[in-house]
Amino acid sequence: MATHPIDTYLLEGRPSKGEVIAALLRERVADPRAAAFYRALEAVGAAAADESLVALRLVLAGSTPDDHSVRRLRGLAAISRAAVAKNSAAVHAAIVKDPEVAADAQPADDLGKLARAVRERYEAMLATPGDVFEPRSSP
């Protein structure tokens, strides 16, 4: 399974949300569960909440975007993005905001290792057995 531009935006902060949304709207999937997300992205563009991108990403992975999965992926993404930016205060704030992902935020003392560990948990939530995430270039 290739890494989707939504993943690099959520986990690393790149490309920009606007670029990701433009790519999503150019390369739509036929899954009817995604149609409402596409309409919303057309309507609000980059003002769309990151949670809507997380929910769409779950749909694109073939999963159901239930509240628990959306919240957990959002929390993992926030920790990853902060760790990639080498911002310990933002890592701490993300953990405080969503204590459920605190167990996934180990080892918090090494931000590089933390970013990799959190990314692995994020990818595992989106993968089906046998999937391997492969890096994808930006849109």
Image (cartoon, helix red, strand yellow):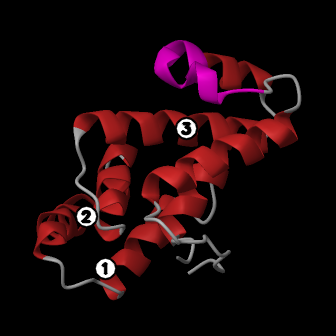
What secondary structure is marked by label 3?
helix
Please state which of the two labelled residues, at mark 3 or mark 2, is closer to the viewer.
3
Spatial CA span between label 1 and label 2: 8 Å
Position of the C terminus by quadrant:
bottom right
Q: Secondary structure at mark 2?
A: helix
- Label 1: how many residues lie within 10 Å, few (<14), some (14-19) or many (20+)? some
Q: Left of 14 or right of it: where is 70? A: left
Place of residue 92 in the rendered image (x, y in percent of width and height, measured from the top left): 67, 17
Can residue 47 be seen here? The reply is: no
Tell me how far mark 3 sits from mark 2, CA to CA: 23 Å
Relative placement, left or right, of 57 versus 34 is right
Q: Residue furthest front?
A: 129
Front residue of this view, candidates 126 and 96: 126
Residue 98 position within the rendered picture, expressed as x and y whole percent measured from the top left: 47, 20
Q: What residue do we see at 53% from left, 53% from top? A: 124
User: Which is more N-terminal, label 2 or label 1?
Assistant: 1
Residue at image position (62%, 77%) is 138
Marks 3/1: CA–CA distance: 25 Å
Label 1: state its secondary structure.
helix
Q: Mark 1–mark 2 contact, CB under 8 Å?
A: yes
The kind of residue on which mark 3 rests is Leu
Instruction: Identify which amino acid the numbered label 2 is placed on.
Output: Leu
- The answer to which of marks 3 and 1 sits earlier in the sequence is 1
Question: What amino acid is at disc 1?
Answer: Leu
Q: In the rendered view, does 106 fall on the left or right side of 47?
A: right
The answer to which image quadrant residue 26 occupies is bottom left
Residue occupied by mark 1: 25
- Res. 49 mark: none
The front one of 81 and 98 is 98
> Residue at label 2?
41
Q: Which mark is residue 76?
A: 3
